[in-house]
Image (spheres, rainbow, N blue to C red):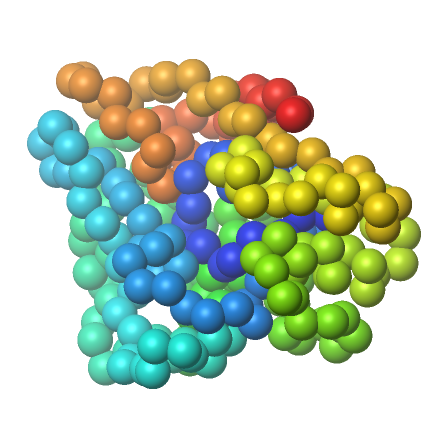
Amino acid sequence: MRLGIMQPYFFPYIGYISLIKHTDLFILLDDVQFIRHGWIERNRILKPGGGGWNYIAVPLKRHHRETPIREIRINNEIEWKQKIKAQLVCYKRAPYYRQVTGMLEEVFAEEYQDITSLDQMALRKTCEYLHIDTPIEVCSRMNLDFELAKYADEWALNICKAIDGVDEYWNPIGGMTFFDRSKYSGAGIDLKFMDMKLKEYGQFQGRFEKGLSILDVMMFEPAEHINEMLEGYRLL
């Protein structure tokens, strides 16, 4: 079985979605420390009028620096859903604006207290829209019996060993520098790194802004074309 593990991201870039599509099980790792200014509670969309990007973000309650992701709470005293929907109006002329905002309404129809639950639902609804059926689970809710990691590259290894049938672990290429392949091969797990090659797609006129949220891609391209884009990778 092919396993993918990432921290929960909020409507992440297309490479994250490709990793989900090409694994048999995808786990959101929420047992590790929350790091500020990452992608867990925010992502990037086009700036109104073109020429750059803005963040869409979910406000969080104050927390201690060592707080794990699973304990990070959303500040629902702020009308964040309405703000995000208002920010996305800049895509009103995009060909799939209605379909994508309809999907977003399904995500926002529920109330969320923690950021992990929101990210999980957002990913599930995104994958449903794209006809991707990979199960997306939350690590802290799986009742897995695994050793805590002594080193950063052992979180995935220990989780792999705790799940029957896992013989491949896929990770984005950005983690290639700190993974020790010998640890994985010694446990009978084939470690692979996905190098995503994203082609430009039809944003509004002007300079192409790369690395934006999957929402940006979905605004301009139909699901079948996005699935073709998701195949644009090589394994190392």
Question: Residue 63: where, in percent of width, then height?
Answer: 32, 82
Quadrant holding the N terminus = top right
- Residue pictured at 31% horizontal, 28% vertical: 210
Look at the picture and state if 206 lies above or below 122: above
Q: Is residue 183 above or below residue 236?
A: below
Q: Is residue 6 left or right of residue 158?
A: left
* Vertical placement of residue 89 versus 106, above or below: above
Q: Is residue 62 above or below residue 215?
A: below
Where does residue 83 sit, x and y in percent of width and height? 20, 60
The image quadrant that residue 207 belongs to is: top left
Q: Residue at x 52, y 26 (%)?
A: 196
**Residue 138 drawn at (x, y percent):** 62, 66
Q: Is residue 74 left or right of residue 143?
A: left
**Rendered image quadrant of residue 144:** bottom right
Q: Residue at x 43, y 17 (%)?
A: 199
Residue 58 screen position, x and y as percent? 30, 65
**Closer to the camera, 193 or 8?**
193
Is residue 213 in sight in this rendering?
yes
Q: Residue at coordinates 79% horizontally, 74% vertically from top-left?
A: 145
- Tally the numbered discs: 0
Q: In the picture, residue 2 is in which quadrant? A: top right
Q: Is residue 221 left or right of residue 151?
A: left
Q: In the shown orientation, is residue 224 left or right of residue 210?
A: right
In this view of the protein, can residue 117 be seen by the observer?
A: no
- Comparing 46 with 145, the one in front is 145
Q: Quadrant of the C terminus?
A: top right
Along the viewing direction, whichever of 144 and 215 lies nearer the viewer: 144
